[in-house]
Amino acid sequence: MRIIAASTGTSGDLLARYLGQRLSERWSQPVVIENRSGLGGVIAGEVAARAAPDGYTVHLGQHGSFSAAPSLYKKMPYDPLRDFAPITHYAYVPLIIIAHPSLQPANMKALVDYVKARPGAVNYSTGGAGGAAHLNFEMMNHAFGLKFVHVPYKGIGAAMTAVMSGEVQLSGVPVPVALPQVKAGKVKAYAITSKNRFAGAQDIPTVAEAGFAGFDAVTWFAMFAPARTPSDVIRVLNRDMVSIIGSPTVRAWLISQGADPAPGTPEELAAFLKGDIEKWGKVIRAAGIKAE
């Protein structure tokens, strides 16, 4: 079997390799991770969509290439809803809204009030246009009537450094990257972007807890097979993957990596994906975002 994932060294690649190893142990057969980099995971998705629907190829889909890409790109080489058979959610990776320690507001609600009073005066860094952090802040602009100013950098590392140095005021950074710097006092954390607090950072409140009910903006990873993969094969894949992802050992490992495990049924994943595409499509169209 092969698992098709995006670029080597990314969070998705790490998750794919970990799951592949556990599946290989369960099945007593090799599971190969095939990395296809480019276009934020879209190239990997195209390869997976065109694979034979025989159960021997699965794909680690993600928020960027499944939920956001249909609205970011004029042309897509696959349809996330039509060309894939959902297997199970794998994990969510929330962002932490961080700031340089000198930024005045003491909490998330105060930050929103601060930005409302200063439209166009508060900026944030991201690893590039159309990424998770960019969409997160545009969702806040749209939902709360704000006007944050986007400052894109080449990669999340550069975006993080910009906040730490005071070059920009804010950013939205994945938990595993942000948390060590929060604990070291180099940045301060305003909120986490998931609907629930993250198990590995229970002291950081959610955006929703600051009075913005329903706010939920996370990067997610899920397992898909090519469309027309037999339903009995999907059931077996779901059974084994859910068993692995939900085990205490794997759950603990995922949390240590800044990921919140979320195994479930194919039907739950299908319904979630449809709603997520619609949600992010509205944000992207309202903000006029185009992929670089």
Image: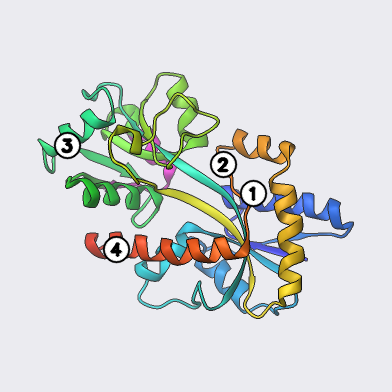
Q: Which residues are magenta?
A: 151-162
Disc ID at residue 15: 1
Q: Position of residue 221 (x, y in %)?
A: 56, 54
Which mark sits nearer the N-terminus, 4 or 1? 1
Residue in the image at 51% along x and 52% along y: 220
Q: Which residue has dot 2 on it?
A: 259
Q: How far apart, in angstroms, are the residues tagged by discs 4 and 2? A: 26 Å
Instruction: Depth check: give the residue in front, 25 or 152.
Output: 25
Give the mark nearer the N terminus: 3 vs 2. Answer: 3
Q: CA distance from mark 4 to mark 1?
A: 29 Å
Does 122 lie within the magenta span?
Answer: no
Q: Position of residue 72 (x, y in %)?
A: 35, 67
Q: Residue at x 69, y 47 (%)?
A: 245
Q: Which residue is mark 4?
A: 282
Look at label 2 and name its amino acid. Ala
Residue 157 part of the magenta-drawn span: yes
